Amino acid sequence: MKEEKALEDYLEAIYELSNEGPVTVTKVSEVLEVSRSAVSQMLTRLKHEGLVSQPFYGEVTLTEQGEERGRKVSGKHKLLVSFLTYLGVSEVTAEKDACSIEHVLQEETIKRLVDFIKDVAWK
């Protein structure tokens, strides 16, 4: 589970960074607050799983499958941050909690949370 969480954190970070411009190992390491060598190791795994591509020391890009997974995790994260801040949780705490929660909630739970927000919280 811990490895899956890390994988999703990387995909989310790469997805978000790609919306801002070219993604580099250094940018990913800064966002995730890990070493560049840790990023390089995870990128090797992500490449092996067909989720990213990166020419030798070049820009990191998500494959179609990687982008889909990154978008999904990012969407869960944003949904959870919005919901938690709606409940009155501080932005800092909501960010931290969303990072933990986004990896364990099942799709059914996320769907119900979206339905609740549409029907009750943000009318």
Image: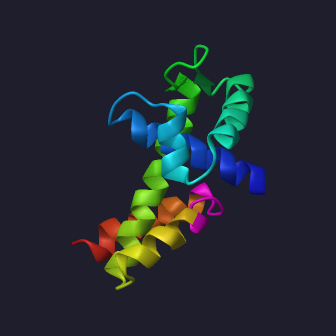
Q: Residue at x 49, y 65 (%)?
A: 112
**Percent x, y for residue 78?**
40, 58
Quarter location, residue 47: top right
Looking at the rendered image, the quarter that the C terminus falls into is: bottom left
Q: Is 87 situated above or below 14?
A: below
**Percent x, y for residue 77?**
47, 58
| Residue 102 among magenta residues | yes
**Percent x, y for residue 107?**
58, 55
Residue 12 visible in rendering: no
Q: Which residues are magenta?
A: 100-107
Is residue 83 found left or right of 100 in the rendered image?
Answer: left
Residue 8 visible in rendering: yes
Q: Residue at x 59, y 50 (%)?
A: 9
Q: Residue at x 46, y 38 (%)?
A: 15
| Residue in front for this viewpoint, 80 or 18 | 18
Q: Is 19 situated above or below 84?
A: above
**Percent x, y for residue 103?**
63, 59
What residue occupies the far left of the structure in this picture? 123
Q: Residue at x 60, y 67 (%)?
A: 100
Number of numbered markers: 0
Q: Is 58 situated above or below 45?
A: above
